[in-house]
Amino acid sequence: MLGLKLPTDPRWVDLAEMDLAEILTDHAYCEQKAATSCISLIQGYPDKVELVKSLAPIVTEEWGHFRLVLLELERRNLKLGYQRKDEYVNELMKFEKKGGSREDRLLERLLICALIEARSCERFRLLSLNLNETDLKEFYHKFMVSEAGHYRLFIDLAKAYFPEELVKTRWQAYLEREAEIMGQLELRGDRMH
């Protein structure tokens, strides 16, 4: 369903489970950045009525997810660590076409958001299936379902504003580049991506 070209190395879950404070911290900041990205899209494209209407509730949902991760940290007597640079997202953004029109930039941003949500969904699925703790498996299953919906929403918004063939072609290019990025990044259990 997600179309990702390179699945996550299964060893990632074992690495993530070794230090839950680190993966939960990174997860918290990913949720915060997702909310911020939606706010930024709304601010940049207030004339896109469907986009504003669709993303406004996502802002609330992503911020709620941030709070849920904070509660999980607290429940485990763990502290939120410092935000780290997201090499995965930074590499994706390097692939974004620079310049162009305001509309061109919208397509790029929607596809980047869709890809981040797709990879998050895939990672949450792995956690929901392979962690040792039942409670944490259920915790991540809920996130997986949510991220799948967000991924679809960003793709659907792209198709609502741009010709389907253009979206499909650019999406395939992003999927290819994302697989290359995943193949080049060090396998780390302290990062959600």
Image (cartoon, rainbow, N blue to C red):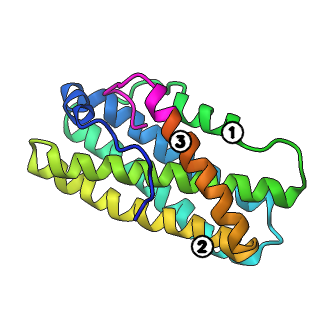
Residue 134: x %, y % from top left: 9, 51
Find residue 73 and report its image quarter.
Answer: top left
Q: Identify the amino acid type marked 2.
A: Asp
Magenta extent: 181-193
Whole-angstrom CA distance, mark 3 to mark 2, is 20 Å
Mark closest to the chain's N terminus, 3 or 2: 2
Residue 40 visible to an observer of this rendering: no
Find residue 43 and report its image quarter.
Answer: bottom right
- Packing grade of label 3 (10 A; few <14, some 14-19, many >=20) is many
- Packing grade of label 1 (10 A; few <14, some 14-19, many >=20) is some
Whole-angstrom CA distance, mark 1 to mark 3, is 9 Å
Q: Which mark is residue 38?
A: none
Q: Which mark is residue 95?
A: 1
Is 31 inside the magenta-drawn segment?
Answer: no
Q: Identify the amino acid type marked 3.
A: Glu
Mark closest to the chain's N terminus, 1 or 3: 1
Q: Residue at x 67, y 67 (%)?
A: 158
Q: Residue at x 31, y 50 (%)?
A: 124
Element type where label 3 sits in the image: helix
Whole-angstrom CA distance, mark 1 to mark 2, is 21 Å
Residue 168: x %, y % from top left: 63, 65
- Which quarter of the rendering shows the C terminus? top left
Residue 146: x %, y % from top left: 39, 63
Q: Identify the amino acid type marked 1.
A: Phe
Residue to which mark 3 is pinned: 178
Please, is residue 156 above or below residue 34 in the view?
below
